[in-house]
Image (cartoon, rainbow, N blue to C red):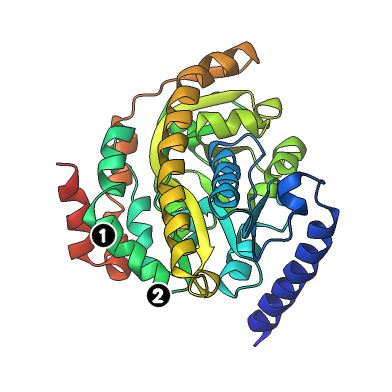
Amino acid sequence: MASKKVIGVASLWIFFLVIITSAMAPGTASAQQKGEFKFDIASVLDSQHPIVLGGNMWGKLLSERTNGRVVANVYPNSQLGGNRETMQATQNGLIQGYLDSSTLTSSFVPQLAVFDLPYLAENTEKVYKILDSPLAQELSQLAIRAGLRPMGLWEATLRSVYSKKPINTIGDLKGLKIRVIPSPSYITVFKALGASPTPMSFGELYTALAQGTVDAAENDMVTFYTSKHHEVAKNYAITNHIFLADTLWISEKHFSKMPDDIKKIMIDAAMEVQVFVRKNRADRDKTAEDQLKAAGVSITYPDLKPFIELGRKTYPEFEGKLGQDLIKKIQDLIK
């Protein structure tokens, strides 16, 4: 009962914050248009993150192709709340969407956690083979039934560890207090690797690193750089332990009310944005390492064999939640 009350309060808080934020939004032409349909899109990420840029592009395409009938505004930097708050607000229809990962959504669609199996794929080519597969489409349908519609699967990132001290071997992770996404997969893998995983909202992380509440965190290079976490954690170890699938999630309550012509425009625009976001991500991945080194970050390349061995040994722990068949299906995709 208490948890339901907390969720209700968070949702109510989101509702009022959306109203206030919308009233204070910058006076751009698109924001001032009296659109027939309005989409407020939340994100905890910064304004220059690839999927936030993608969200802005999606809104621009909608406005152009519907002659202003649809107005979509993206609110980055946790303006509308944290990860879980904005996801729940989208599912409940209090806001129209959020930009985030499949990992977050797996709390409502458990099968999506199959994307979070550690060391499933060692490069983005193999990751996109998974995300563009019929299996991914099946999982997307499950999300839609849970009230959260993925507008494609825009990008994939391979995540690594950043910390206050260098990580040269798996032994350097022992006892390290590391912030992780609040997900069983992330908690399980870092326990297996010897660290002390600490679930925490992304919006709280910069301060937590600066104050020493946590010793480390994990994310892709571009997000590490654009979020400015390199200012408070000067070491980045290439561990590539999990890939993350990011996209735009739309409230199915709102999508279902759209006229058919606008639904088609929304879907077509999202597929165009997916091409843009993947290219933007690839281009920025190529330059991120040089940017980090120029900012004084030390980058290390530990031997991944012991990481992979311990990470993949955790798979049986997920069979109860995911089932052996689903785990085998996703492994077979990249063999």
Q: Quadrant of residue 170?
A: top left
Q: Are marks 1 and 2 in contact (CB under 8 Å)?
A: no
Q: Which label number is shown at residue 316?
A: 1
Q: Nearer the viewer, residue 292 or 168?
A: 292
Q: Quadrant of residue 95?
A: bottom right
The quadrant the C terminus occupies is top left
Q: Residue at x 45, y 49 (%)?
A: 270
Residue identified by numbered label 2 = 145
Mark 2, Cα crowd under 10 Å, few <14 / some 14-19 / many 20+, is few
Q: Residue at x 19, y 42 (%)?
A: 334
| Placement of 184 over or under 74, stated as above or below | below
Amino acid carrying label 1: it is Pro
Mark 1, Cα crowd under 10 Å, few <14 / some 14-19 / many 20+, is few
| Placement of 268 over or under 307, stated as above or below | below
Amino acid carrying label 2: it is Arg
In space, the residues marked 1 and 2 are separated at their CA atoms by 27 Å
The quadrant the N terminus occupies is bottom right
Image x and y of residue 319, in percent: 26, 65
Q: Secondary structure at mark 1?
A: helix
Q: Residue at x 52, y 38 (%)?
A: 219
Q: Residue furthest bottom?
A: 1
Instruction: Indicate left or right for 36 with 129 as reference.
Output: right
